[in-house]
Image: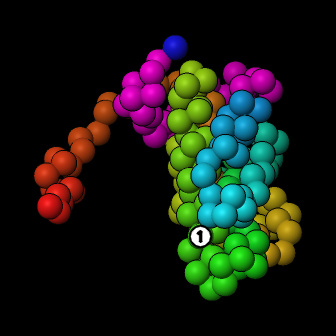
Amino acid sequence: MWDFFETVRHRHSVRSYQSDLPVEKEKLNAIIETACSAPSAGDLQAYKIVVVSNPEKRQALSAAAHEQGFISEAPTCLIFCAEPERSAEKYGDRGRELYAIQDTTIAAAYAQLAIVAAGMASTWVGYFDESRVKDIIKLEDGLCPIAILALGYPAELPEPTTRRRLDEIVTQLD
């Protein structure tokens, strides 16, 4: 098993999946459990996760995401939805407008790392028509889709992308 740093280094956005290999239930459960272990403001976990394996729904999600075809190719999609009012009850406007989104994205990031640790790959999708996604997954009122993770076994591994140098990103204050 890889150590944490190796797992992070092997996380890449994959846009080609082996659609004939489903995500095993045990692995999916471990991924979701890992996502739910992510830190959240006040431990409120102000999010919901919708699992979509149905091919027709994945096709509709692909269309709602501006025809990003790999979404329908991936055998499973996880849709991470913020629950703003859950955070607002404790933290007011800041909880509604920020903490719920942070909680949701942290959970999705944990899921991405768990997907790599489980020997699979994913792509984070944020470019989609929110109202269409809500309709497709019949999302209850008060929830807001933040990210779609397409996941499965990769059909190809992309070349690693270059990253900015640390000195371009980090400022050290003494």
Residue on which disc 1 sits: 99
Q: Note whether 87 is above or below 156 in the view shown.
A: below
The foreground one among 91 and 13 is: 91
Side of 139 relative to 83 (left or right): right
Q: Position of residue 32 (x, y in %)?
A: 72, 39
Residue at 54 percent of width and 47 percent of height:
109
Q: Amino acid at mark 1?
A: Tyr
Camera sees residue 16 = yes
Count the numbered circles shown. Answer: 1
Give the image's coloring scheme. rainbow
Camera sees residue 150 = no
- State the residue lying farthest toward the bottom: 93
Residue at 66 percent of width and 64 percent of height:
42
- What secondary structure is found at the residue carrying circle 1? helix
Q: Which residues are magenta?
A: 2-28
- State the residue lying farthest toward the top: 1
